Image (spheres, rainbow, N blue to C red):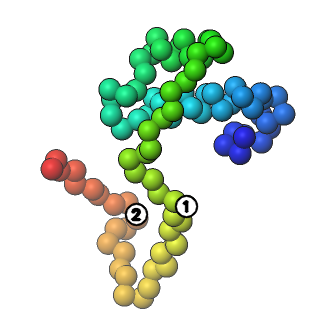
Amino acid sequence: MKLIEEHLVESSVPTQVLKCIQIGLLCVQTDPVDRPTMSSVVAMLGNDIISLPLPAEPAFYVRGFLAEPIQPNSSDRICSVNKVTISNMSPR
């Protein structure tokens, strides 16, 4: 229940919230073969009797990383008059 907006907690049914989260996790599995089809998702959402498969472990997970803001130092120089950068996109 910590995943949903605070103002929605009172009007939410915990079992329905957990069901939606589990279906969402099934939809983002690493291997596309393991993901349910849209018709399966609709059936899972509309039917309380269907038992949902457990999603696989996530392939990549970052645990609470928070970058520190970078403070400019005196050796940094501004190369743009209007502080706009230009990025060159190139394929791999």
Front-most of 57 and 10?
Answer: 57
Give the class, few, some or many, for how many residues have Cα within 10 Å of label 2's Cα (few <14, many ≥20): few
Q: Which residue is denoted by mark 2 in the rendering? A: 82
Q: Is residue 86 left or right of residue 67?
A: left
Q: Pointer 2 and pointer 1: residues touching (CB < 8 Å)? A: no
Q: Is residue 75 above or below residue 84?
A: below
- The image shows residue 45 at horizontal and vertical percentages of 60, 17
User: Which is nearer the N-term, disc 2 or disc 1?
Assistant: 1
Q: Position of residue 26 (x, y in %)?
A: 47, 30
Say which quadrant the N terminus sits in: top right
**Depicted 66 relative to depicted 5: above or below:** below
The kind of residue on which mark 1 rests is Gly
Residue 17 placement, left or right of 7: left
Q: Is residue 91 above or below residue 53?
A: below
Residue 89 is at least partly visible in this image: yes
Q: Mark 2 or mark 1, which is nearer to you?
A: 1
- Where is mark 1, residue-wise? 64
Residue depicted at 41% across the width and 17% down the height:
37
Q: Is residue 12 left or right of residue 66?
A: right
Would residue 24 be visible to someone looking at this image? no
Three-letter code, disc 2? Asn
Q: Point out the residue furthest to the right here.
A: 10
